[in-house]
């Protein structure tokens, strides 16, 4: 158990002791009064002193009757059991609270909300859904929490239409940037499903709906660009890809290869190079530097080499250094070329072993770009890594 969990147990133990003392009106001054304290309470203290936190919690639960004075304690203990993974104990506590004849309507809804969380943690999604929909129909003070849990549930089930319906209501009643971003990704999930089935019109509609709820949805812009490329509408694809720079420049390394290919289909490289130069001034990255170096090397290799050296001094990256070595080894001969090739291969092994993307929310890293972080489940927080070992 964490230090926080131990602190919670200690707090509960002390509070129970205080509560028992208060119910008796004064401190026990003799053996007979001391015997009135439940044995389970002392058993819990003994477990706590021996470092047996789980057993201590069980004992404290047994020592407390369910009444108005202990309601909040039972609610806290039920939540603690759920966080520890002891779901059945949490369910039992919350169901015992619901069975109280004197429970208020507000407390009933609060316990039902916690019970729905128990059911979700136990994988009993149908029961959780029915309970949450029942509470939501009454439009209580817990609407935000209810809608959030329902969105979580439908997201887990990948029931995207249902998730979108509830997420829209959540965003309407409780506007929030994160809610809008999440909703946009739900539309993108439907768009990708439609695209796989070759239902391009529906895919277009879903991607555009994602942009409507979140104008900075990079995933939707890239998805639209892919659809335009599939239809050979390269000018439209270029427009969508260039918009990524305004939405979130950290994703530029993802779209530059697509942008280069689209420009080659319709225009000369002038517009492409101008875009790269503008972005390099504002948001320098290894991918931008390499793309410009490749272009400059076509007409003037010496200028390209000086360009990359200048950029490396200002923005040093392993990828940029690797590009410089690759240029120099092509002009070298004999042992020099062999040595540079060995160095190039070593750097290649180093860069290939390093993660390319990292979640800005939890720090999860990997080679693949995930629109939803596999670790913390946040949407749109996994981005290309920048810095010496990245962009």
Image (cartoon, grey):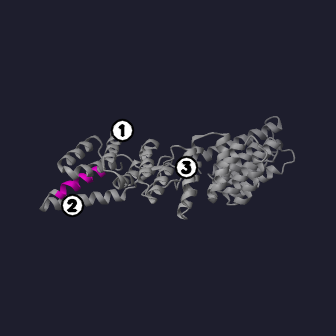
For the residue pair 121 and 50, the one nearer the viewer reads as 121
Q: Which mark lies nearer to you, 2 or 3? A: 3
User: Which residue is situated farthest in the top direction here?
Assistant: 26
User: Which residue is situated farthest in the right direction here?
Assistant: 101
Q: In the image, residue 248 lies at what x, y percent?
A: 45, 44
Question: Which of the two labelled residues, at mark 1 and mark 3, occupies the earlier sequence position?
Answer: 3
Is residue 326 on the magenta stretch? yes
Q: Secondary structure at mark 3?
A: helix
Q: In the image, residue 287 lies at what x, y percent?
A: 34, 50
Q: Is residue 205 visible?
A: yes
Q: Secondary structure at mark 2?
A: helix
Q: Is residue 317 visible?
A: no
Question: What label does residue 341 carry, if any?
Answer: 2
Q: CA distance from mark 2 to mark 3?
A: 47 Å
For the residue pair 276 and 66, the one nearer the viewer reads as 276
Q: In the image, residue 113 lies at what x, y percent?
A: 73, 48
Question: Which of the two labelled residues, at mark 2 and mark 1, occupies the earlier sequence position?
Answer: 1
Please give the name of the residue rendered at 70% of the width and 47% of the height, measured from the top-left corner.
146
Q: Which residue is mark 1?
A: 282
Crowd tier of the residue under label 3, counting other residues whose Cα lies within 10 Å: few below 14, some 14–19, many 20 or above: many
Q: Magenta span covers which residues?
A: 318-330
Q: Secondary structure at mark 1?
A: helix
- The answer to whether 291 is drawn above or below residue 69 in the figure is below
For the residue pair 61 and 302, the one nearer the viewer reads as 302
Q: Main secondary structure of the magenta part?
A: helix
Residue 390 shown left or right of residue 164 in the figure: left
Q: In the image, residue 295 lies at what x, y percent?
A: 26, 50
Q: Which residue is mark 3?
A: 208
- The answer to whether 211 is drawn above or below residue 190 in the figure is above
């Amino acid at each position: 158990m964490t230090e926080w969990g131990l602190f919670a147990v200690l707090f509960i133990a002390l509070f129970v002791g205080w509560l028992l003392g208060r119910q008796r009106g004064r401190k026990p001054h003799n053996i007979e009064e001391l015997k009135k304290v439940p044995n389970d309470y002392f058993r819990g203290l003994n477990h706590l002193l021996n470092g047996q936190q789980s057993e201590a919690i069980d004992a404290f639960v047994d020592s407390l009757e369910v009444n108005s004075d202990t309601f909040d304690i039972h609610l806290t203990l039920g939540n603690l059991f759920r966080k520890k993974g002891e779901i059945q104990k949490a369910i039992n506590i919350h169901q015992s609270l619901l069975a109280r004849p004197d429970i208020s309507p507000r407390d009933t809804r609060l316990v039902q909300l916690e019970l729905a969380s128990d059911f979700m943690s136990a994988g009993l999604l149908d029961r959780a859904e029915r309970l949450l929909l029942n509470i939501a129909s009454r439009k209580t003070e817990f609407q935000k929490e209810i809608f959030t849990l329902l969105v979580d549930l439908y997201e887990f089930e990948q029931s995207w239409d249902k998730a979108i319906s509830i997420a829209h209501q959540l965003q309407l009643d409780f506007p929030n940037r994160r809610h809008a971003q999440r909703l946009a990704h739900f539309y993108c999930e439907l768009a990708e499903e439609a695209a796989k089935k070759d239902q391009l019109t529906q895919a277009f509609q879903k991607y555009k709906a994602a942009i409507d709820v979140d104008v900075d949805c990079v995933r939707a812009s890239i998805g639209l660009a892919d659809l335009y490329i599939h239809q050979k509408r390269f000018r439209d694809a270029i427009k969508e890809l260039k918009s990524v720079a305004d939405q979130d420049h950290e994703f530029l390394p993802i779209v530059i290869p697509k942008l280069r290919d689209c420009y080659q289909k319709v225009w000369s490289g002038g517009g492409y190079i101008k875009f790269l130069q503008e972005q390099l001034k504002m948001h320098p990255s290894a991918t931008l530097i390499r793309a410009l170096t490749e272009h400059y090397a076509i007409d003037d290799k010496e200028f390209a080499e000086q360009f990359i050296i200048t950029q490396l001094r200002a923005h040093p990256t392993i990828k940029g250094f690797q590009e410089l070595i690759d240029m120099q080894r092509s002009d070298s001969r004999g042992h020099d070329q062999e040595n540079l090739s060995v160095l190039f291969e070593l750097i290649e092994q180093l860069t290939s072993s390093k993660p390319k993307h990292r979640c800005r929310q939890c720090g999860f890293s990997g080679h693949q770009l995930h629109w939803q972080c596999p670790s913390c489940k946040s949407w749109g927080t996994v981005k290309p890594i920048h810095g010496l070992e990245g962009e």
